[in-house]
Image: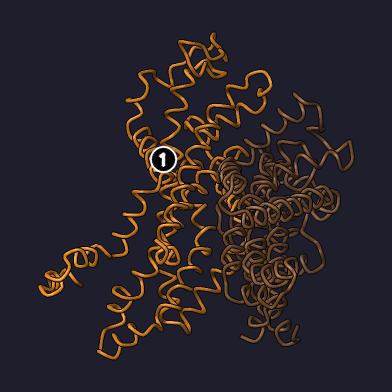
Amino acid sequence: MASQMGPSPVVAELDPQVDKQERDATLWGDVWKKLRRDKRFLIAATLILIFLLMGAVPQLFTHADPRQCDILKFAQRPSRHLWFGRDILGCDYYARVIYGARTSLIVGLVTSASTITIALIFGSIAGYFGGVPDAIIMRIADVWFSIPTILGAILLLTLIHGSGPLIVAFVLILFGWPDITRLVRASVVSGKERGYVRASRALGASNRYILAKHVLPNGIAPLFIYGAYGVGAAIGGEAGLTFLGVGLRLPTISWGLQIAVAQDRFFEFPHLLFFPSLFLSVLIGAFILLGETLRDALDPRVFGSA
Amino acid sequence: MTRSYLLRRLLIAVPVLLGTTLLIFSLVFALPGDPIRRLAGNHRISESTYREISHRYHLDEPFAVQYLEYIKGIAHGDLGEDFHGQEVSDIIKQRFPVTLRLTVGAFAIEILLGLLAAFVAALRKGTFLDSFILVSTLALITIPVFVLGFLAQLMFGVKLHWLPIAGIREGWLSYLLPALVLGVGSAASIGRFARSNLLENLSSEHINAATARGLPRHRVLGFHVLRNALVPIVTLLGLDFAFLMGGAPITEQIFNLPGLGQQLILGVQNENGPVVVGLVTLAALIFIFMNLLVDLLCAYLDPRIRYG
């Protein structure tokens, strides 16, 4: 708003510092300022960028072909030449682990982004209009919510006999959307009765305008937090499902599969379990850390003290 | 607790119960594939056998009738037969105690460790202990439950020989490690959540007032801080129960506990549909019941909820 009206010449003359601060004081400007100073955010962001790069262009990290295997070199232990050793089919384990990043990231990002989008649409309709649409959407959400995500995913994946990152993501979305839809609805409900919304309505603003300009912008910030947590949860969920034998299957390269294969031989060849677990934990941790730093940066109670 | 609130809450649970069973049932119904052909495997079966089996399992009836039969069965505690002719409810009866001990143990660990960590961290905010708890809980949340399981087996079982790492032959000792593995991740998230919650309450005005009135510290903490902080914590504990139930199959698989989760995985591997459907239905029913319990507990803790 301030930038539209231009800097007030009076204030600028009195104290140029005040004017500059006022222009910077948008929500995201504030958040960015806080994030930049937060070491945890820098760590999380760096890790996520590295993993994104690994998922997009694994060739940057390894020249080896993860599907080129030599069965005679079965489960070779890590050495100076092969840091991660070889897996039970004699494939270069470092290359296998690097190529696994893409699968996890696809499942995590697709699941989280779709869940948030669905929750945003249904949650804002239910919260803003109330009445019948609210009742219909939220009762359906209640029903889906009653089936624990992992168990529902096990059921559905058993029945559809499908496999692949997108199918796993689809199933996780199907059982995961009610949680966030409830949160969006709650924030829309509390947002729509605020003074500025009533004022806007009194001025003749349309529902769509009010929703898009006033209600959602305030409810959207927390969604980034859930989004970040959601990526971590979905990656962990996929690994768990795959570990149980209902998620991804060969020839997909995935950390969950590597861990599942390694579990039977884990006392003899601990390296087979160690490396994919390490990458998996670090990636999930990076997204959880991102969510936490976003939460701290967005928390209005912290605004006052900063 | 007001009786009308209890009644209202119970009435809401009924349609959810019906809706959830309908959902699970239609998921199974809507999916392609012929259960009788699957039952027969590679063998050819005669037309008359086919008709006889589909009549016995009500497969020749319309969807609504099938659903009613299924609901009637559930109401009688009958979840049908699996593909080997064994009653699903018998399987559940046999294996339920194992899963119950595991989840109750994990839940207890979650509550005790989580709240203990939260209290210590909140009361010693900014000290080394606080940072240590914050970092270690983050690490525990991050590590997936199966990785944690293998690490625990390797450390406490193989290297230190402290605890049994598989099976249930050593009584409650056998459950200690699995329950710890299943519960510690949730304990960590509860701990972090409760810590910020306690901190918020500690700095609120009614606590200053209570302290100023000269109430002893333990009374301030126990009644004024904890009771207010407990509502969101109990809510999260209830939600987290779904996470425990999802983690139980993985934990039972790793520690070779003959519980429902292991049966679920067996059912998946043998494509034994009725077992999988029955167990997921059971889990959903338990979860609905848990949510009901959480709502009632919250209403008890905070009167504003039951009159609101």
Image location (x, y in percent) of residue B132: 60, 43
Corner quadrant of residue A214: bottom left
- The C terminus of chain A: image quadrant: bottom left
Category of crowding for the residue at label 1, using alpha-carbon neighbours closer than 10 angstroms: few (below 14), some (14–19), many (at least 20): few
Disc 1 chain ID: A
Chain A painted colour: orange
Which sits in the foreground, B7 or A43? A43
Which residue shows up at 34% across the image and 87% down it?
A: A198
Q: Is residue B58 above or below residue A256?
A: below
> A53 or B54, which is in the foreground?
A53
Q: Amino acid at mark 1?
A: Ile
Residue beneath disc 1: A43
Please name whichever residue, A75 or B231, is drawn nearer the observer in this view of the structure: B231
- What's the residue at 50%, 19% (across, down)? A84
Residue B128 in the image: above or below residue B54: above
Q: Is residue A71 left or right of residue B183?
A: left
Residue at the image position 88 percent from the left and 36 percent from the top: B169
Where, quadrant-wise, is the N terminus of chain A in this rendering?
Answer: bottom left
From where the camera sits, is residue A268 visible? yes
Residue B139 image offset from top left, x and y in percent: 57, 41
Asked if B160 appears above or below B238 in the picture, the reply is above
Residue A300 drawn at (x, y percent) = 42, 66
Q: Quadrant of residue B295?
A: bottom right
- The scheme the figure's colours follow is by chain
Q: What residue appears at the point 31 percent right and 54 percent down from the top-left corner?
A: A33
Q: What tint does the image give chain B?
A: brown
Locate residue B138 relative to residue A194 in the image: left or right: right
Secondary element type, mark 1: helix
- Total labels drawn: 1
Can residue A240 be spotted in the picture?
no
Residue B229 position within the rendered picture, expressed as x and y whole percent measured from the top left: 64, 68
